C-alpha cells in the first residue's frame, strides 16, 4: 500500500483500545513506524441504539453493518471486531483474515463476591439471553433486567444502585486495565459465548495484499477454537434471542469443544462436548445436530433449524 493503511473499528473506548492493539501488532510485524496504521472510528447502529436489547432491534448485525459498508466501499482497508459480536454468517465479499491469540475467556460477576453471595431476588443487569439463562439456571430467584452501554456505563448503573450486579467479559475488563474488578464465574456455571475473548481482523476477499500481511497476525490455535465455536452456533441457526454457549480449547491441534444450549428461563439445558483434530467444522456441526435432536421443545423451538 502506498498510503497509510486504514483500520475500521467501533468508536467505544474498548473498541479503540482493541484497534490500537491490532495496529501496533501490524506495525511491529511489518516494521512500520508507530502510528503508521490509521484508525478510523465508525459509529454503528449498535452504538446508537442503547436503550433496547440488540435482539429486539436487529441482532449482532447492528455491530457490523456500517463497518462492513465502509470496508466494501474502500473507506477502510481492514476492520477489527470482537468475535462474539460478529454474525456467524458473513458476506462472501469479506474474509476473516486473522484471529489474534486469546487468553481471557470467562465472564465476570460485578457487584458481589459470588453468585451465592447475591441476596434473594437480587436484580442482575444483562441483555444477553445466554447470560440470563445461565444465571437463572444457577439462581432461579434472580430478577434479570436488560442493561446496555459500554463497560463504564454499566459499572456506573451498578454504582447508582440500578442493579445489584452485572456480568462483563474478563477479556474486555483486561483490555481496559480493570482486572481488579469482579470475580470470575466458573465455566460450569457460565460457559462463554462463541468467539468470546477473541479479536478478529477482516478485509475484502479480493484484497490479496491485505490478506497477505494480515495473516502474519493469525494465531492457528485461536482460529481452530473460534471457528469450531462459530460452526457449532451456525449449524444451530441461532440468533441473539437464543441462549448458546460454546468454548473450544486447543492443545497440539487437538480441539476440545464444550457446548450448551438452554431454554430462555434456564430451567432446561443440554450440555455436551467432543474432541477432534485440526480445523474441521464437521464435528461441531455433528455436535449441534445431536444436541438439538435431544433437546426439549422449550429449547428446540428457539432455533431456526429445529
Image: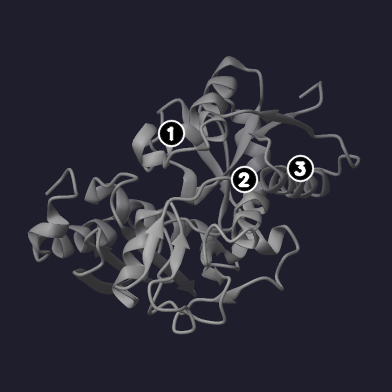
Residue at point 66%, 55% (across, down): 156
Element under disc 2: helix
Tell me the colour scheme of the image. one colour
Query: Vertically, is 72 above or below 127?
Result: above
* Tags 1 and 3 touching, CB below 8 Å: no
Q: Quadrant of residue 121?
A: bottom left
Q: Residue at x 68, y 52 (%)?
A: 152
Can I make out residue 284 in this image? yes
Q: Secondary structure at mark 3?
A: helix
The quadrant the N terminus occupies is top right
Q: Residue furthest top?
A: 73
As displayed, is residue 45 above or below residue 161? above
Task: Judge depth for marks 1 and 3 and give the one in front.
Answer: 1
Please say if 68 is above or below 215. Answer: above
Residue placed under numbered mark 2 in the picture: 215
Q: Percent position (x, y) of residue 24?
A: 80, 47
Visible residue check, residue 277: no
Task: Using the image as rendered, state which of residue 190 and residue 113 is in the foreground.
Answer: 113
Q: Which mark is residue 23?
A: 3
| Label 1, residues with CA under 10 Å away: few <14, some 14-19, many ≥20 | some
Amino acid at each position: 500500500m502506498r498510503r497509510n493503511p486504514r483500520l475500521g473499528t467501533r468508536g467505544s473506548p474498548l473498541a479503540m483500545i482493541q484497534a490500537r492493539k491490532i495496529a501496533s501488532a501490524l506495525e511491529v510485524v511489518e516494521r512500520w513506524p508507530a502510528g503508521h496504521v490509521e484508525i478510523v472510528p465508525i459509529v454503528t447502529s449498535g452504538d446508537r441504539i442503547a436503550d433496547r436489547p440488540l435482539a429486539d432491534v436487529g441482532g449482532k448485525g447492528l455491530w457490523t453493518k456500517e463497518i462492513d459498508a465502509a470496508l466494501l466501499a474502500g473507506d477502510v482497508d481492514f476492520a477489527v471486531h470482537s468475535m462474539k459480536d460478529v454474525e456467524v454468517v458473513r458476506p462472501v465479499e469479506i474474509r476473516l483474515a486473522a484471529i489474534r491469540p486469546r487468553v481471557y475467556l470467562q465472564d465476570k460477576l460485578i457487584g458481589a463476591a459470588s453468585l451465592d453471595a447475591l441476596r434473594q431476588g437480587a436484580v442482575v443487569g444483562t441483555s444477553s439471553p445466554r447470560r440470563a439463562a445461565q444465571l437463572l439456571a444457577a439462581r432461579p430467584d434472580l430478577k434479570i433486567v436488560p442493561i446496555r452501554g459500554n463497560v463504564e456505563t454499566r459499572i456506573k448503573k451498578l454504582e447508582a444502585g440500578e442493579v445489584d450486579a452485572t456480568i462483563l467479559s474478563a477479556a474486555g475488563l483486561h483490555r481496559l486495565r480493570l482486572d481488579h474488578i469482579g470475580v470470575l464465574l466458573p465455566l460450569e456455571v457460565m460457559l462463554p459465548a462463541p468467539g468470546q475473548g477473541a479479536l478478529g481482523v477482516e478485509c475484502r476477499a479480493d484484497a490479496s495484499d491485505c490478506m497477505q500481511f494480515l495473516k502474519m497476525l493469525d494465531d492457528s490455535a485461536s482460529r481452530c477454537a473460534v471457528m469450531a465455536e462459530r460452526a457449532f452456533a451456525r449449524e444451530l441457526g441461532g440468533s441473539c434471542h437464543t441462549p448458546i454457549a460454546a468454548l473450544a480449547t486447543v492443545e497440539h491441534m487437538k480441539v476440545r469443544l464444550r457446548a450448551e444450549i438452554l431454554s430462555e428461563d434456564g430451567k432446561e439445558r443440554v450440555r455436551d462436548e467432543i474432541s477432534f483434530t485440526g480445523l474441521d467444522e464437521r464435528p461441531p456441526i455433528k455436535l449441534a445436530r445431536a444436541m438439538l435432536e435431544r433437546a426439549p421443545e422449550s429449547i428446540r423451538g428457539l432455533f431456526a433449524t429445529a
